[in-house]
């Protein structure tokens, strides 16, 4: 747990706990937010899908800080964590939105 917290604690500490948060009509992924930043946990297929969202400024793997390729079309964001970056621990994808 300490290893995971070393790189991903910002996704669970000091996040916005009050609504509005992304609801199930926007995403099936577990998501936390802090200001204009979303933290999404990829699903069992290592993917993040978010509907009705603006174009992100950046999409990165929180554990490594590496930028992730993503698709954005018709207000929908799709991110798949590449196999070479996957581990057995849960990952978080950091999505920074325009203010």
Image: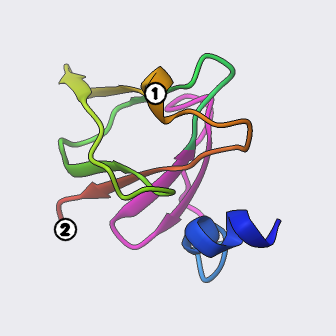
The span shown in magenta is 18-40
What is the x, y in percent for residue 94?
Answer: 41, 54
For the residues labelled 2 and 1, the Cα–Cα distance comes to 32 Å
Q: Please tell me whether mark 2 sits on a helix, a strand or a loop.
A: loop
Our reading of the magenta stretch's main secondary structure is: loop
Q: Write down the residue under mark 1.
A: 84
Q: Is residue 30 magenta?
A: yes
Q: Which mark is residue 54?
A: none
Residue 81 in view (yes/no): no
Choose top left, top right, bottom left or bottom right for residue 50.
top left
Q: Is residue 24 magenta?
A: yes
Q: Quadrant of the C terminus?
A: bottom left
Q: Which residue appears at 22% of the width and 43% of the height?
A: 54
- What numbered label is drawn on residue 99? 2
Could you tell me residue 22's position as x and y percent?
A: 53, 47
- Please state if 14 lies on the left or on the right of 72 as rendered: right
Q: Is residue 52 above or below residue 3?
A: above
Q: Can residue 8 be seen here?
A: yes
Q: On screen, 97 above or below 55?
A: below
Give the x, y percent position of residue 98: 17, 60
Q: Is residue 55 above or below residue 44?
A: below
Q: Residue at x 59, y 64 (%)?
A: 19
The residue at the point 32 percent across, 50 percent down is 66
Which residue is most to the bottom?
A: 14
Tell me which numbered mark, 2 or 1, is placed earlier along the sequence.
1
Question: Residue 90 appears in which quarter of the rendering?
Answer: top right
Q: Nearer the viewer, mark 2 or mark 1?
A: 1
| Residue under the point 34% across and 50% down | 60
Q: What crowding class fits label 1: few (fewer than 14 Cα within 10 Å), some (14-19), or many (20 or more)?
A: few
């Amino acid at each position: 747990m300490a290893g995971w917290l070393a790189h991903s604690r910002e996704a669970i500490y000091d996040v916005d706990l009050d609504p509005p948060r992304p609801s199930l009509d926007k995403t099936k992924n577990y998501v936390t937010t802090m200001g204009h930043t979303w933290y999404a946990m990829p699903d069992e297929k290592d993917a993040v899908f978010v509907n009705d969202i603006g174009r992100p400024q950046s999409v990165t793997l929180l554990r490594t800080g590496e930028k992730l390729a993503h698709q954005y079309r018709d207000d929908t964001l799709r991110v798949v964590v590449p196999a070479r970056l996957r581990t057995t621990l849960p990952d978080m994808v950091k999505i920074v939105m325009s203010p």
